[in-house]
Amino acid sequence: MPDPAALLELAIAVASQAAEVIRSASLADPADVSTKSSSTDLVTATDRAVEVLIVERLLSARPDDGIEGEEGASVEGTSGVTWVIDPIDGTTNFAYGYPAFSTSIAAEVDGRPVVGVVHDPVRGQTFSAVRGQGARLDGRPAAIRLAGPPLAHALVGTGFGYDAGRRAAQGAVLAQVVPHVRDIRRAGSAALDLCTVACGRLDAYYERGLQHWDHAAGALIASEAGAWVGTLEGGPLATERTIIAARPDLVEPLLALLRAAGADTMP
Ligand code: LIP
């Protein structure tokens, strides 16, 4: 078993180096922005450059590790450790200069996250967790709001996919959810949303269609902070499921509300 503290230290250092590139990036040249899975799914030259930097730094420190990156980096490792990387989570925000995006780096051992780091280059904040050792914000313990308002007064985060059909279905579910909560927040970065629950700035978050790299680090941070992290449909976190992170006391009413809203039958 690799030393989790060493993996954490490496991930934090590399995420901070990535932040320097992100902060100094300019998207002046329109060619720097292109699309992927749909016309609304943006990728920038900075996403790609930051992923190359992160992979270089991780593999120069740990050459036998594996890599799974959003922008295509894929390395089969021999050490049992695989790094799951989202160089810029919230790329649409980044491309617009809308200040809500992050770098997400998780270390998984035999498919299980053991270390998670989410760095917010706009606020200069680093969320982190080691499995079984709690969550931290800038090195200080971070925890969910243990007690708080009932669902009707809960602040809930969510998000929408890049496929128009799925967006329509997510909008229909949201129309059913909004009257039954305090309000909704749509930040645009799942990794940040999960960390926002982890430090009590949101009471709950749910989204369907997230990729592994969107949630690998943030889900560990939220669960180590005391949140219930799971899926509406039951079973492990997966793209075809609705991922939820919430104060434990909100889980049952939130699951019931999402089911009543048809979230478990969305495309
Ligand atoms: C984004 C997620 C966000 C979701 C977007 C997109 P990306 O990831 O963080 O929660 O609503 O559709 O998936 O594409 O910016 O890495």
Image (cartoon, grey):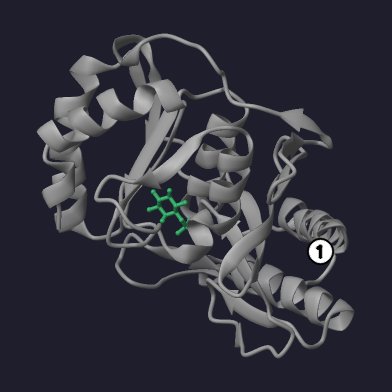
Residue that carries the numbered disc 1 in the rendered image: 7
Seen at 56% across and 23% down, the residue is 201
Describe residue 124's horizontal placement relative to residue 217 as left or right: right
* Residue 205 position (above or below residue 68): above
Q: Amino acid at mark 1?
A: Leu
Under circle 1, the secondary element is helix
Describe residue 85's horizontal placement relative to residue 33 as left or right: right
Residue nearest the observer in this picture, 2 or 241:
2
Residue 188 visible, this angle: yes
Q: Quadrant of the C terminus?
A: bottom left
How many C-alpha atoms fall within 10 Å of the one at disc 1: few (<14), some, or many (≥20)?
Answer: many
Q: Position of residue 60 (x, y in %)?
A: 86, 82
Seen at 52% across and 63% down, the residue is 213
Describe residue 220's horizontal placement relative to residue 181 as left or right: right
Residue nearest the observer in this picture, 108 or 163:
108
* Residue 250 position (above or below residue 37): above
Residue 93 visible, this angle: no
* Residue 157 position (above or below residue 12): above
Q: Quadrant of residue 62?
A: bottom right
Disc 1 residue: CB within 8 Å of ligand 1: no
Q: Quadrant of the N terminus?
A: bottom right
Seen at 68% across and 51% down, the residue is 131
Seen at 35% across and 11% down, the residue is 150
Residue nearest the observer in this picture, 88 or 81:
81
